Amino acid sequence: MSRTVSETFRRALYAAQTDEVIVALLTITHDDLAEPVRLSTDATERLSADPLSYGTTSRGEVYQFVPISVVLSGETDDAPPQVALEVDNVDQSLITMVRSITAPASVAIEIVLASDPDTVEIEFPAMLTGSADYDAEVVRFSLEVDSLASEPFPGTSFVPSMFPGLF
């Protein structure tokens, strides 16, 4: 699958050294949340002085900076792709969110450049949280892509009662 990305992004990606910063923006949405949780992997700008907070503003939305670690799983034929997401537990809001959600939440990941945060270079489809746990230091999410491999094919059976013209 090919992606169209800007020349600046490609140069930053392939350069041994660059002044460009590649930023991942995460948006966690769920019906039980009053508003989406937006997180950034870069402290692009100071958002407030009291309390001191940093983040990224992209397309009018504010993404709070927290250290995030993403581990992609290998591709196998017998399991859907998974992503392990670890977010540093910098305040209790993430734990409160995890405790309040009863069904899987949707997590969208977008890649932007810090110099041009309004242009989304790469967008990953919304993934669902498979599990979430936490301790005093980190909140861990297991993200799963909705696999079409588990969908029945064909959707219906070609039987005389449903498709009499075939018989």
Image: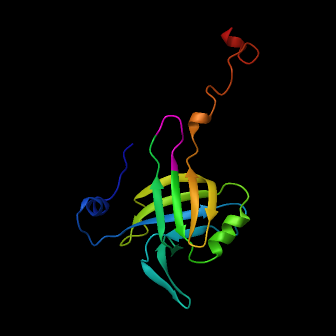
Q: Main secondary structure of the magenta part?
A: loop
Please identify the quadrant where the C terminus is shown. top right
* 54 or 141: nearer the viewer: 141
Q: Quadrant of residue 159?
A: top right
Please identify the quadrant where the N terminus is shown. top left
Q: Quadrant of residue 99?
A: bottom right
* Render colour scheme: rainbow
Asked if residue 151 is positioned above or below residue 162 in the image, the reply reads: below
Question: x and y percent of residue 73 in the render?
Answer: 47, 48
Question: x and y percent of residue 98 in the render?
Answer: 67, 65
In the figure, is residue 124 to the left or right of 94? left
In the figure, is residue 18 to the left or right of 111? left
Q: Residue furthest front?
A: 136
Residue at 58% in and 45% down? 146
Magenta segment boundaries in residue numbering: 76-82
Residue at 62% in and 25% down? 154
* 60 or 10: nearer the viewer: 10
Residue at 60% in and 63% down? 28
Label count reads 0
Question: x and y percent of residue 100 in the render?
Answer: 73, 66
Q: Residue furthest top?
A: 167
Q: Residue furthest left?
A: 16
Residue at 56% in and 77% down? 90
Question: x and y percent of residue 151 in the render?
Answer: 62, 34
Q: Is residue 63 magenta?
A: no
* 112 or 65: nearer the viewer: 65
Q: Residue furthest right?
A: 161
